[in-house]
Image (tube, helix red, strand yellow):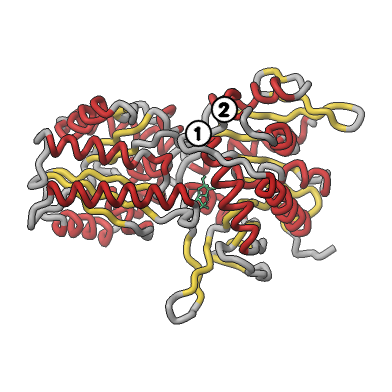
Amino acid sequence: MPDDRTDFIVVSNRLPVDRVVDADGATAWKQSPGGLVTALEPVMRAADGAWVGWAGQPDLDLEPFENEGITIVPVPLSERDIELYYEGFSNDTLWPLYHDVIAQPSYHRVWWERYVEVNRRFAERTAEVSAEGATVWVQDYQLQLVPRMLRELRPDLTIGFFNHIPFPAYGIYSQLPWRTQIIEGLLGADVIGFQRAADAGNFTRAIRRLLPYSTRGSIVEVPDGDGTREVVAKAFPISIDAAAFEELAQRPEVVARAAQIRHDLGDPETILLGVDRLDYTKGIGHRLKAYGELLKDSRIDVEDTVLVQVASPSRERVETYRQLRDEIELTVGRLNGDFSTISHQAISYLHHGFPREEMAALYLAADVMLVTALRDGMNLVAKEYVAARKDEDGVLVLSEFAGAADELKAALLINPHDIAGLKDTIMQAVEMPRADRRRRMRSLRKRVRDNDVAHWSRSFLDTLRRARAES
Ligand code: F6P
C-alpha cells in the first residue's frame, strides 16, 4: 500500500482549478467556475486533504500535484466522456430535471451508460488515494453513483455526499428512467446533504415511492448484509467564507476599484447588478424583461441608472446554453439599441468570469443586487454581496426559488415569473430609504456571518462522524 494515501478526500466532477492553454500554447491553472469551488476551497485549505476531480480539458492524464496547499488528484475524461457523461447526462438530463424541467431533459441510454462508467472511474481513483478508515466527501449531481460504488470497493471508508443543486419533487423525478439506480447510488453514503429541507423531503419521499426501505424523519434504513444501515438525509445550507470575503472587500485597492467602476459607468445614481453563470436557471431573461419595461415605462432613466450584467461563460457546447446565449445577447443588444444614449448605456453586459477582487469591487459599487433565479440550489452570489457590504448599504432582491431565500428573509423576496411584481420590487429597492437599507442589510449580514462555510462543513462532517460511529 502506498503511504501517501490521505485521510480526508473531496471528490467533485471539476477540480478547484481548470487547466487552461493560452494563445502561445503555455499552460496555466485558473480557478474553476461555480459555487461548489467557492464553498469548498476554504474547507480544503484548512483540512490538508486531497481533491479528486477533472481538470477541465479532454484526455489529460496527470499525476497528482500540489496547488496552493491542496493535493490535486486529476481524473482523466476523454472527448467522448465529456460529450456523453458531462454535457449529456449531467447537464442535459440531470441538470434540467433537477431544476424543475425549466428546459426539457433528454433521456439517452448511451449517456446513462457513460455516466455509470465515469462514476466508476471516480470511485476507483478515490479508493486508490484513500487511507484506511478515511473520510470521503462526494459532491454533486454528476457523481451520484459514487457513494455506493465506493462502499463496495472500500467498506472501511466513511462516505458523505452533498447535492449542490435542488432535488425535485417525485412527480418530476419519476420521469428519470434510472430513478431507482440513482437513489441506490446515493444511499451508499452515510450522510446525504441537501441545500433545503424541501430537497431532503423530496428525496425521502422518492425513496418511499421506489424502494421498500423504511424512513423516519431524516433516517433511512438501508439493508446491509444480514442487517440494516442507517443513512441520514437532511439539509445543510451551504455558504461562503464570509469573513475572508468581507476582508477582501475592505482592501483599499478594492474600495478604490469600486469607485473607479462607478466613475467609468458615468457616475450614475443607481447601479443595478446581476452576476450569474450564463445558465437558463438564473432567470436572466426575466430580469432583462423587467428592466426593459421599467425603461420603457420611464420609471427609470438611463441618464441616472445602469444595469451591469456579468454572465460568465458556461457549458458552451450544450445546445440549450448556446440558444440561451443568443437570446440573452439579442435582448441586451435590443435594449441597448432602444434606450442607450451616446454617454449612457442601459446595460453593461460582460460575458467573462472575473477574479474575486473584481467581483468584490462590483458588489461594493452596486446599489441593488438582482438575483432572479427560476430555480437555484443556494446562490452564493447573494451571500457574497451581503458579506462584501460592511458599510451596511445596498439592497438584495432575491428570488424565492433560490435556496438562499430560506435564510435571507430580510432581502426583498420576489417571484421572477411575476414581471409586474419584479418591476415594483426593483423600484422599491432603488427608492429604499437609507435607514431601511441599513436595517435589512444588518440582519442579512448577521445571518451570513453566523452561518458561514466553516459552520456548514463542520455541521455536515460532525453529522457524518456521529452517523458512522452509531452504525
Ligand atoms: O453546483 C452546481 C455546479 O454544477 C457545480 O457542480 C459546478 O462546479 C458548477 O456548478 C459549475 O458548473 P460546471 O462545472 O458544469 O462548469
Say which residue appears at 60% left-offset and 29% top-offset: 173
Q: Position of residue 297 (x, y in %)?
A: 11, 33
- Residue 61: give x, y in percent of width and height: 67, 69
**Would residue 377 be found to the left or right of residue 350 on screen?**
right
> In this orientation, which residue lies closer to the viewer: 226 or 104?
104
Query: Label 1: which residue?
Result: 101
Which secondary structure, mark 1?
A: loop
Q: Which mark is residue 172?
A: 2
In depth, the one of 456 and 415 nearer the eye is 415
- Classify residue 187 as left or right of residue 37: right
Q: Picture quarter containing residue 252?
A: bottom left
Q: CA distance from mark 1 to mark 2?
A: 8 Å
Q: Residue 259: x percent and y percent?
A: 18, 56
Compared across the picture, whether 151 is left or right of 165 comes to right
* Residue beneath the point at 11% across and 46% down: 302
What residue type is disc 1 on? Val
Looking at the picture, which amino acid does disc 2 mark?
Ile
Image coordinates of residue 267 in percent, x first then y, are 11, 52
